[in-house]
Amino acid sequence: MPSRTFTVDALNVQVYPDPDTLAQVAAQQVVERLTLTLQQQSTATVVFATGRSQLGVLSYLRQNATVDWSRVIGFHLDEFLGLSREHPASFGYYLHTQIAKWLPFQAFNYLNGDTLEPIAECDRYTQLLSQQPIDICLLGIGDNGHLAFNDPTVANFNDPRFVKLVRLDNTNRQQQLASQHFSQLSDVPAYAITLSLKAIYTARYNVCCIFGAHKAEILKTTLTALPSEACPATILRLDGDSNNSLFTDELACQFV
């Protein structure tokens, strides 16, 4: 059971004592949603996020044998421009090692970060995503409130695109440097391909995980500030067709 639950506008918030518990519950929510979806349609589409916030959830998902994963189509949320899938800092590498290689997906559609034509790659991925609605989207919240690579500098609640090329702001690049895959800030790619906030907003079910004391300030902003592009994660509070859940722990939620 969660320590507490509450809603902020359209966002359901569940607070748990520790990151492992919230990861278990979030994974179980994904499993239950997938099971229900596959009872109603032939395939399900899931967009996977990366980062520390996702490790526990992906670990529990790849141990699950109740979902018919052969009917699940995987996508990923964003990717650095200029990195191949074999690069240990690429998100494609992360998702292959953490989830894709463990489960018999019908397909797992990667963003090609090392493409020579990034706009064409955005178009290709948009076409793939447009073949059916996004049933589930897994998310984390960045230090500057970004969802995927939608930093405040490029965020647009009414974006006409589903997938776009963006330049990363310095706060985001500093956060990527902390991943220890890059030796210095200049090594962190300056550009990335990302699903837009519009794409995320249209997902049928968004599952966002955020934990730890270092995330307390941005979580407070996400839950209390007026929704705007200044904190892209606040889009999860807006009314729409999505069912949005945020899973957090007491350390991150200490000021709310």
Image: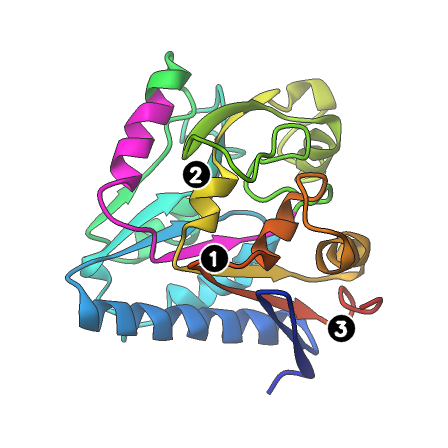
Check the image and report above or below for 107 versus 93: below
Q: Residues within 10 Å of mark 2 (few under 14, many from 20)?
A: some
Instruction: Name the residue nearer the viewer: 14 or 48.
Output: 14
> Residue 147's quadrant in the figure?
top right
The residue that label 3 is drawn on is: 250
Which numbered dot is residue 240?
1
Secondary structure of residue under mark 3 = loop
Asked if residue 128 is among those painted magenta in the image, a careful observer would answer yes
Report the quarter where the C terminus lies.
bottom right
The numbered mark at residue 93 is: 2
Pointer 3 local density, CA inside 10 Å: few below 14, some 14–19, many at least 20: many
Would you identify the image quadrant in which residue 120 lies? top left
Residue type of the residue flagged with mark 1: Gly
Q: Residue at x 47, y 41 (%)?
A: 198
Q: Which residues are magenta?
A: 121-141
Magenta segment includes 57: no
Which residue is outermost to the left?
A: 42
Q: Residue at image x 73%, y 44%? A: 143
Q: Residue at x 44, y 73 (%)?
A: 29
Report, in whole angstroms, how far the alpha carbon at label 3 lies from the one at label 2: 31 Å
Task: Answer whether labels 1 and 2 touch (C-beta < 8 Å).
Answer: no
Viewer-closest of 173 and 243: 243
Mark 1 or mark 2: name the one nearer the start of the chain.
2
Residue in the image at 38% along x and 59% along y: 204
Alpha-carbon span between mark 3 and mark 1: 28 Å
> In the image, what residue type sits under mark 3?
Glu
